[in-house]
Image (cartoon, rainbow, N blue to C red):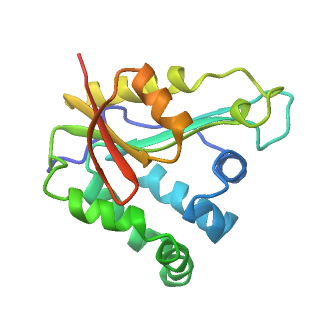
């Protein structure tokens, strides 16, 4: 598969600030619980992956962890393999321990292996907006940066955007429904959704 990105270069990203924002917005994820150095390693790997795209809007004149971010890939399985190798043994072991303590997502993804297409789609890996947890933070909206990622998917030749979230996360489910995502299936307390890209 051709791994050339639709954009020759991605904008410079302050990875430590992005990692702090991720932990602020999504404190319950396995990656946040694994520590800032794991998050920095994850984003560093994504930024080097030509099949992935990271969008980071830092908040001007506000604390460094405020802002908005989204990351996605047009080759989800390959990107996940690159993350495993890119983190290195120690950081990946720490992340794996956190994932093992929260196994439902892993079980759901295994069940979805035959459902998620192997090509022609974009996959939203993560999305967070500091304003959702800090009302005074910069007013960048999740829908705005998600649309930017979807545009990147389209330029990469993707016809659909896919994402998953926990069924208990009613806020995320409502958000994705508002921006046009439809439920594909539910397994192990997780929900898989997709959207046609015009």
Vertical arrangement, residue 184 with respect to residue 150, above or below:
below
Residue 140 x/y as whole percent: 65, 22
Residue lying at 31% horizontally and 47% vertically, measured from the top left: 51
Residue farthest to the top? Answer: 198
Residue lying at 75% horizontally and 30% vertically, measured from the top left: 59
Whether residue 11 appears in this view of the structure is no
Residue 147 x/y as whole percent: 43, 22
Q: Going by the image, does 197 lie left or right of 172?
A: left
Q: Going by the image, does 49 lie left or right of 59?
A: left
Q: Quadrant of the C terminus?
A: top left
Q: Going by the image, does 168 lie left or right of 14?
A: left
Whether residue 85 appears in this view of the structure is yes
- Of 6 and 33, nearer the camera is 33
- Of 8 and 190, nearer the camera is 190
The image quadrant of residue 171 is: top right
Residue 21 x/y as whole percent: 70, 46
- Of 81 and 197, nearer the camera is 197
Q: Going by the image, does 68 lie left or right of 151?
A: right
Residue lying at 45% horizontally and 23% vertically, measured from the top left: 148
């Amino acid at each position: 598969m051709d791994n050339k990105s639709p954009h020759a270069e991605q904008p410079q990203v302050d990875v430590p600030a992005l990692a702090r924002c991720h932990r602020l917005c999504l404190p319950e994820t396995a990656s946040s619980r694994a520590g800032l150095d794991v998050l920095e390693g994850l984003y560093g790997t994504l930024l080097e992956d030509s099949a992935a795209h990271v969008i980071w809007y830092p908040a001007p004149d506000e604390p460094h962890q405020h802002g908005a971010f989204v990351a996605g890939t047009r080759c989800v399985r390959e990107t996940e393999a690159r993350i495993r190798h890119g983190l290195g043994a120690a950081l990946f072991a720490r992340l794996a321990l956190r994932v093992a303590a929260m196994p439902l997502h892993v079980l759901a993804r295994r069940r979805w292996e035959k459902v998620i297409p192997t090509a022609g789609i974009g996959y939203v890996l993560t999305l967070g907006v500091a304003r959702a947890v800090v009302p005074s933070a910069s007013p960048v909206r999740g829908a705005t940066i998600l649309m930017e990622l979807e545009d990147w998917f389209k330029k990469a030749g993707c016809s659909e955007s896919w994402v998953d979230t926990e069924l208990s996360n009613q806020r995320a489910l409502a958000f994705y429904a508002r921006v046009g995502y439809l439920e594909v299936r539910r397994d192990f307390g997780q929900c898989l959704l997709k959207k046609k890209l015009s």
